[in-house]
Image (tube, helix red, strand yellow):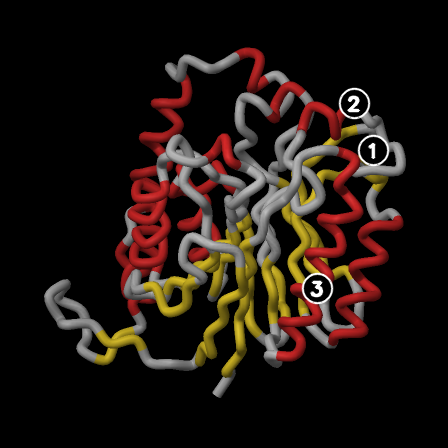
């Protein structure tokens, strides 16, 4: 059996450049706490050092918060991962070849960088300052296949489907969503898990005082873990904290037979064997020719 303890964190990320040190300290505290819980893989929230994309971009590779990848901050978290013997997913803005990306860096428990994912669908606010990624990497981490996406990516079901078709067993989703859309988001990420017979892990920011302006208008984020049935199996609730769950990645997935598949079911293999990819691809190509593209958005990608 490949049983792994998967964890996710929700905590308040201050958005002033002067609070970067505080955000780093919070993240490290949760890494150490996760280690005390014997968590194998830990996900931190999106933009864990700062939410202020505009100010971050204007720092132009200065001390904080955007570094030329891999820089001092990434290496510092590599050291903490090694000290804590934990696999870590670190979402942060980075410079690479004179471009800024919203990146999640995958670090193993030896402190080595396994790889990275760069947000494929930046928001309109971000695209003023950053570039979009163009790759769908699947990584081998602690003998399971993982993938990651970021925030707005959840609105594009193609991303999860591609990962599933490439063999990912779990998708990690760091996000920064403190708006009034939490119920809708829950329906989305639970659907992504069901559609692809895959585990999904969310790490969102929390929202509490002194962020009083968010009260009433905004709802706090949360961290949770969703199984392949779409059930939430671990959850911080709408508050700061850490959640975790022991997942057996060799578990046999059972269906009711309603879909006409086998009772003892490897759902993804069943779906992959019947999905009409050539037909969908043909339609996408036709539709893309007539797509009304945002010139400002697409010229950077």
Q: Nearer the viewer, residue 127 or 64?
A: 64
Q: Which label sits on residue 29?
A: 3
Binning the other alpha carbons within 10 Å of mark 2 as few (below 14), some (14 to 19) or many (20 upward) gives few
Indicate which disc, 2 or 3, sits on the residue closer to the N terminus.
3
Image-quadrant location for residue 141: bottom right
Residue in the image at 85% along x and 39% along y = 68
Q: Is residue 94 left or right of residue 171?
A: right
Q: Residue at x 51, y 35 (%)?
A: 212
Percent of width and height locating residue 22: 75, 48
> Which residue shows up at 73% across the image and 76% down it?
85
Q: Is residue 13 left or right of residue 57?
A: left
Picture coordinates of residue 252, whole percent (x, y) = 33, 80
User: Which of the two discs, 1 and 2, labels the residue nearer the N terminus?
Assistant: 2
Q: Secondary structure at mark 1?
A: loop
Q: Position of residue 99 (x, y in %)?
A: 77, 29
Q: Secondary structure at mark 3?
A: helix
List the residue tagged with mark 1. Answer: 97
Instruction: Identify the image quadrant of residue 112.
Output: bottom right
Contact between marks 2 and 3 (CB within 8 A): the answer is no
The reply to whether callout 1 and callout 2 are in contact (CB within 8 Å) is no
Q: Secondary structure at mark 2?
A: helix
- Camera-nearest label, 1 or 2: 2
| Dot 3 crowding, Cα within 10 Å, few <14, some 14–19, many 20+ | few
Q: Of circles 2 and 3, which is in front?
A: 3
Calculate the distance from the C-alpha at mark 1 to the C-alpha at mark 3: 32 Å
Q: Nearer the viewer, residue 193 or 243?
A: 243
102, above or below 6, in the image: above
Dot 1, crowdedness within 10 Å: few (<14), some or many (≥20)? few
Query: What is the spatial separation of the Cα atoms under label 2 and label 3, in whole angstroms?
Result: 28 Å
Going by the image, does 19 lie left or right of 173? right
Q: Is residue 236 visible?
A: yes
Residue to which mark 2 is pinned: 58
């Amino acid at each position: 059996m490949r049983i792994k303890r998967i964890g996710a964190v929700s905590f308040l990320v201050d958005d002033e450049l002067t609070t970067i040190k505080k955000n780093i300290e919070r993240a490290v505290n949760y890494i150490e706490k996760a280690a005390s819980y014997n968590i194998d893989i830990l996900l931190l929230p999106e933009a864990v050092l700062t939410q202020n994309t505009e100010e971050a971009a204007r720092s132009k590779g200065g001390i904080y918060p955007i570094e030329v990848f891999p820089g001092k901050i990434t290496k510092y978290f590599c050291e903490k991962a090694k000290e804590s013997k934990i696999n870590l997913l670190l979402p942060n803005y980075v410079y690479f070849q004179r471009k800024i990306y919203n990146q999640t860096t995958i670090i193993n428990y030896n402190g080595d960088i396994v790889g990275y994912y760069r947000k494929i669908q930046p928001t309109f606010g971000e695209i003023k300052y950053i570039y979009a990624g163009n790759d769908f990497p699947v990584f081998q981490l602690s003998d399971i296949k993982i993938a990651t996406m970021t925030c707005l990516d959840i609105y594009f079901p193609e991303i999860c489907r591609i990962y599933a078709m490439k063999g990912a067993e779990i998708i990690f989703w760091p996000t920064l969503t403190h708006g009034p859309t939490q119920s809708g988001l829950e329906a989305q990420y639970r659907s992504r898990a069901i559609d692809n017979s895959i585990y999904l892990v969310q790490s969102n920011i929390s929202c509490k005082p002194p962020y009083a302006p968010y009260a009433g208008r905004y709802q706090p984020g949360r961290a949770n873990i969703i199984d392949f049935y779409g059930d939430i199996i671990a959850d911080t609730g709408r508050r700061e904290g850490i959640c975790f769950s022991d997942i057996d990645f060799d578990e046999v997935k059972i269906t009711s037979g309603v879909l006409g598949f086998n009772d003892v079911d490897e759902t993804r293999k069943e779906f992959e064997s019947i999905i009409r990819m050539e037909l969908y691809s043909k339609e996408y190509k036709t539709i893309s020719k007539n797509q009304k593209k945002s010139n400002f958005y697409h010229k950077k990608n």
